[in-house]
Amino acid sequence: MLAPMAGYSDKPFREIVREWGADYAVAEMTASREDLRCRAKSLTRWVERDEPGLHVVQLLGADPVVMTEAAKAAEDDGADVVDINMGCPAKKVLNTDCGSALMKNECLTAEIFEAVRAAVEIPVTLKIRTGWDREHKNAPEIARIAEECGIAMLVIHGRTRADGFRGDAEYDTIARIKAERGIPVVANGDIVSGVKAQAVLRACGADGLMIGRGAVGRPWLFAEVRAALEGRAWKPLENGAVLRHLLHHRAKHFDYYGARHGIVTFRKHLCAYLKPFSDPLELRPKLLRETDPQVQKALVEQFFSETAPAH
């Protein structure tokens, strides 16, 4: 599964990872308040009717009534699944008592789960962390509440809110929840290779894996993981193949956003694709500043013609 990532898991990227074998892809989180979710930028995080596969909308909020209204709107607009965000550790999210801040209020989480689940016919899923901090790892209790309220699937990132994305993810908490609960459990955090995917499944016995940052700039990670889980060998992509797939993603991105906006918003993806490579001609800064789409494309091609993988 592709994790929801603000600024990354947009429609073009979701289509790309599906091409590489992802079974399930969650859209970027969107605010549940109507005045916020109906803004132009937020609408790109909503239901894309022509998107292949399941349409999964992730909602951010802390008011059961507002979350219910947003879930109904998503269902009416064609969502197949509504996911509740209780994992985001960003300060601007926490300041509104949303995201992983909800893990501090188990009574409120129960109200939200019950209200949203009763309001829609489609499955309601949940993404959480292991707790607010390492002294308060209450994910097992949140999981119990979620299961009792009819949440259909639970995704657990193996870090606390206080950890952010620092340090190594841990899987003992995920393993405990999998052993205690009957709800499907998906492991998330630091899955960056096929070997690591195998190790995570052995460690926690999860029903599935969710991959986030590891796939940015490497969407073929899903194919690598699938190969590992099926006992097949995986051969790293050569420079020419990386270039082809980068340009394919870029073309999809530009088709969706338009070249003028797309050349700016694709820079973060471009940085990720180029990160493993050396840059003997020092083209990277110029390439990332370039505002002409055709010149940028030529610079990308030149970059790959003159460089070699750093690993």
Image (spheres, rainbow, N blue to C red):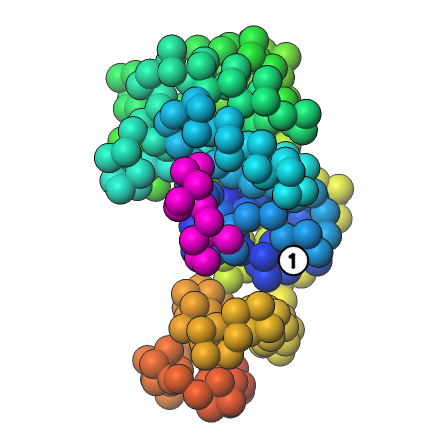
| Percent position of residue 221, x then y | 60, 53
Q: Can residue 127 be spotted in the picture?
A: no
Task: Give the residue displayed 75% in from the left and 42% down from the top.
Answer: 230
| Residue 33 belongs to the span the image colors magenta | yes
Q: Is residue 272 above or below residue 51?
A: below
Instruction: Residue at 34% x, 81% y: name it.
Output: 289
Q: Amino acid at mark 1?
A: Glu
Which quadrant of the figure contains the N terminus?
top right
Residue span colored magenta: 32-43
Camera-nearest residue between 52 and 155: 52
> In the visual, does 69 lie left or right of 48?
left
Between 35 and 125, the residue placed more toward the observer is: 35
Q: Quadrant of residue 195?
A: top right
- Secondary element under disc 1, as helix, strand or loop, is helix
Camera-side residue of 71 and 143: 71
Residue 64 in view here: yes
Q: Residue at x 51, y 35 (%)?
A: 70
Residue on which the image places disc 1: 15
List x then y, in percent, for residue 131.
Answer: 36, 22
Please tell me whether residue 53 is drawn above or below residue 268 in the rendered image: above
Secondary structure mostly seen in magenta is helix
**Rendered location of residue 139, percent (x, y):** 42, 18
Total numbered badges shown on the rendered structure: 1
Q: Residue at x 46, y 65 (%)?
A: 269
Magenta span has 266?
A: no
The answer to whether 13 appears left or right of 213 in the picture is right
**Which x, y percent locates residue 44?**
52, 56
